[in-house]
Amino acid sequence: MSHSALRVRKSKRFMQNQTEVKADRISALPDSVLCHILSYLPTKNVVATSILARRWKLVWTSLQKLYFDDRQSRRLPGMMGDPMPRFEDFVERVLTGTQPTNITTFFMHCSRPVDLSSFHLWVCSAVRRNAREIELYLDQNHRVELPEELYVSPSVEVLKLMSDFLIKVPAGGTCFPNVKILTVQLESPENTLTEKLFCSCPSLEELSIQAYLNDEGPTTKFVISSSTLKRCTLWVATEGEMFTQAEYKVRITTPSLERLHIMSDIFGKFLVHDLNSLTDVILDIVYGEWSRVDPNRSIQLLQQLNNTTSLTVSYGMLCALDHAYHKWFPALSHLQHLEVAVRAIGWAVLPVILSSSVHLQSLVLRKQSRFAVTEEQFGWIEGDIVPNCLLEHVKKIEITGVEGDEDELILVEYLLKYSSVLEVMVIFFKGSVSKLERRDIERSILQVQRASHRCKLELV
């Protein structure tokens, strides 16, 4: 054998030994470490490691995070060469084969109808193993009741019900005793459900409601009452057409609430109480010329949320305010950060909002794509009085989506001219702006006179 062939053989043998050493190092790790690494994979992939080698045959049985998703059932693994099981059989085998008396996470997604008795047994198995986080999705033609054990579980802290389950609050008045984070999906819910549910959760800190409404039936009422709730997201969508007749009302009584996020494609009626701890509000509500609701609801809602220090307003919300501000506008004396999405309508009310926010320190204007409107409707409208917040308090301004239009330069000139204590203005160009156009815009902006000598311009 030639010397070159001998060197190639030795090199291959060395590489093979190195690979085996690396494999042995991984296999030599304790089961607890391996399970922690494997916990980031779907359960079906973890179980599949049982065919790698004898060392891996039982590693998956120590899993503490169980993820079952029937959308992956076509690729479910057998156990050491066994034929591919059905989804239900796979779940049963995993639950039977895993050893931990305590698990941290139980995720169940059933996109096709399953045997409900089996489903209940699976959930009860997770509860009995003291699961801290449970997420359930079940696609059935009707609402499915939750197992009674879930309502009283002392271990569950995170509960996500991602489909419309039939929720029955226990007669004792306490529901999900240690759940801190709750997500529920509701389809045209009965009004008595929300009246009883949330106030019965003694540990609730974070709530997310995903609600679907239709035109049929009475007005849907959401009652969110909790002394412990700190963060709340309400997402409301209609199943009908744009010109829907759906209506809903919301009553919020949450003295510890710090963050409120409302997303809705229709403007409901809101009544809030005791929001003394509120600091962050996001109002992403759709409103347009075609809307059939009273735009004054926007003013009334803002009045009830005037304790917040941070406010984000969608373009739809701004349109509603633009239609209603002529009669009166609430004082936003606690507001320090304001973020507004602007398009064609809403420029008239923007100076009013700034004048009402006397202690505002940070302003973000997110310019979105313009629609076919007259020139008079688009662009900054200068009032007779300069908002006090610009003269004394605003330190940072961001403007995004800049394209180089003349109306944008007018706005920049105004803000730089009157923002006496401004420290930084950040301008983000739209991606479609060419390098040549950007240089021309930058040249124009840098020539604008600034009231604040400390102001820095950042063009991104």
Image (cartoon, rainbow, N blue to C red):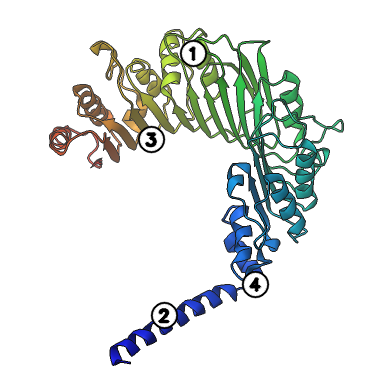
Q: In screen coordinates, is 38 left or right of 179?
A: left
Q: Does residue 451 lie above or below 246 as drawn? A: below
Q: In the rendered structure, which amino acid carries the disc numbered 3?
A: Ser
Numbered label attached to residue 431: none
316 vs 445, nearest the viewer = 316
Q: Which residue is mark 2?
A: 15
Residue 103, image x, y percentages: 71, 55
Residue 455, image x, y percentages: 25, 40
**Front label number (3 vs 1):** 1
Q: In the rendered structure, which amino acid carries the disc numbered 1?
A: Met
Report how far apart the C-alphas of labels 1 and 4 lie in the structure.
Answer: 60 Å
Residue 224, located in which quarter of the rendered image? top right
Q: Looking at the rendering, in which quadrant would you find the N terminus? A: bottom left
Binning the other alpha carbons within 10 Å of mark 1 as few (below 14), some (14 to 19) or many (20 upward) gives few
Q: In the rendered structure, which amino acid carries the disc numbered 4?
A: Arg
Mark found first going from the N terminus, 1 or 4: 4
Binning the other alpha carbons within 10 Å of mark 3 as few (below 14), some (14 to 19) or many (20 upward) gives many
442 vs 374, nearest the viewer = 374
Q: Which residue is mark 4?
A: 54
Numbered label attached to residue 242: 1
Report how far apart the C-alphas of labels 3 and 2 lie in the structure.
Answer: 60 Å
Residue 150, image x, y percentages: 78, 41
Identify the secondary structure beneath mark 1.
loop
Mark found first going from the N terminus, 3 or 1: 1
Identify the secondary structure beneath mark 3.
strand
Report how far apart the C-alphas of labels 3 and 4 lie in the structure.
Answer: 61 Å
* Mark 2 in CB contact with mark 4 (< 8 angstroms): no
Q: Which residue is mark 3?
A: 362
Mark found first going from the N terminus, 3 or 2: 2
Mark found first going from the N terminus, 2 or 4: 2
Q: Looking at the rendering, in which quadrant would you find the C terminus? A: top left
